[in-house]
């Protein structure tokens, strides 16, 4: 009877782990497909008639992309420092990541409220609003989790 119970617990843990990895894999695959769609739309538009292409200011788009890249680098460094067991550096980098995420959210707010591009102006605006909207939600959740992690765990 105990072996049946132990085997059923093992089976549940194996199945739930596989489901968790499948969900994470599908999430990453969906993000990759969103970016491939964006890149395909960009190149498809560049192949069209040049008289139809409007001039746009890419500075705001590039600034937000830079902040996202900095956040990605910090997450990678934090993962590396956790594996090295450098907990003090993990704490400092987590605080920096929270600051970067708040900067991203403020830039996102400025973009949505002050940028003079509208959904009907240009195709890149629609794609960019969709992509950054998804990333804003992702950054909000990550910032909340990072705040909880930094307050719950005290590093020496």
Image: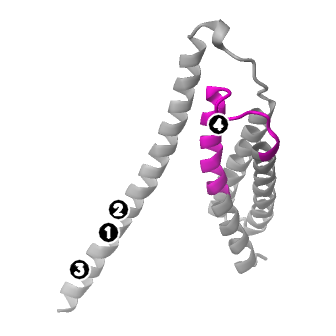
Q: Position of residue 17 (x, y in %)?
A: 38, 66
Of 49 and 44, nearer the camera is 49
Q: Are marks 3 and 4 in contact (CB under 8 Å)?
A: no
First to last magenta residue range: 113-139
Q: Which label number is shown at residue 117? A: none
In this view, 145 is above or below 132? below
Which residue is labeled 4 in the image?
A: 128
- Of helix, strand and loop, which one carries label 2? helix
Q: Are marks 2 and 1 in contact (CB under 8 Å)?
A: yes
In this view, 2 is above or below 78? below
- The span from disc 2 to disc 4 (Cα, nearest Å) is 33 Å
Which residue is labeled 3 in the image?
A: 7
- Of helix, strand and loop, which one carries label 4? helix
In this view, 13 is above or below 31? below
- Of helix, strand and loop, which one carries label 3? helix
Task: Look at discs 3 and 4 and give the one toward the viewer.
Answer: 4
Residue 53 part of the magenta segment: no
Q: Are marks 2 and 4 in contact (CB under 8 Å)?
A: no
> Dot 3 surroundings within 10 Å: few (below 14), some, or many (20 or more)?
few
> Dot 4 surroundings within 10 Å: few (below 14), some, or many (20 or more)?
some
Q: Earlier in the sequence, mark 2 or mark 3?
A: 3
Which residue is labeled 2 in the image?
A: 18
Total of numbered circles in the picture?
4
Task: Residue at 64%, 29% (x, y): give it.
Answer: 124
Q: Earlier in the sequence, mark 2 or mark 4?
A: 2
> Dot 1 surroundings within 10 Å: few (below 14), some, or many (20 or more)?
few
Which residue is labeled 1 in the image?
A: 14
């Amino acid at each position: 009877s105990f072996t049946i119970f132990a085997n059923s617990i093992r089976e549940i843990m194996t199945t739930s782990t596989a489901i968790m990895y499948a969900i994470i894999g599908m999430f990453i695959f969906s993000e990759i497909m969103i970016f491939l769609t964006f890149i395909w739309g960009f190149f498809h538009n560049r192949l069209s008639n040049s008289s139809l292409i409007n001039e746009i200011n890419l500075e705001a788009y590039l600034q937000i992309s830079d902040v996202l890249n900095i956040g990605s680098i910090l997450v990678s460094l934090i993962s590396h420092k956790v594996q090295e067991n450098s907990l003090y550096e993990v704490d400092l980098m987590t605080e920096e990541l929270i600051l970067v995420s708040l900067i991203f959210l403020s830039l996102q707010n400025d973009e949505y409220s002050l940028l003079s591009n509208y959904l009907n102006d240009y195709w890149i605006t629609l794609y960019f609003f969709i992509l950054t909207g998804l990333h804003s939600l992702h950054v909000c959740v990550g910032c909340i989790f990072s705040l909880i992690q930094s307050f719950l765990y005290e590093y020496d």
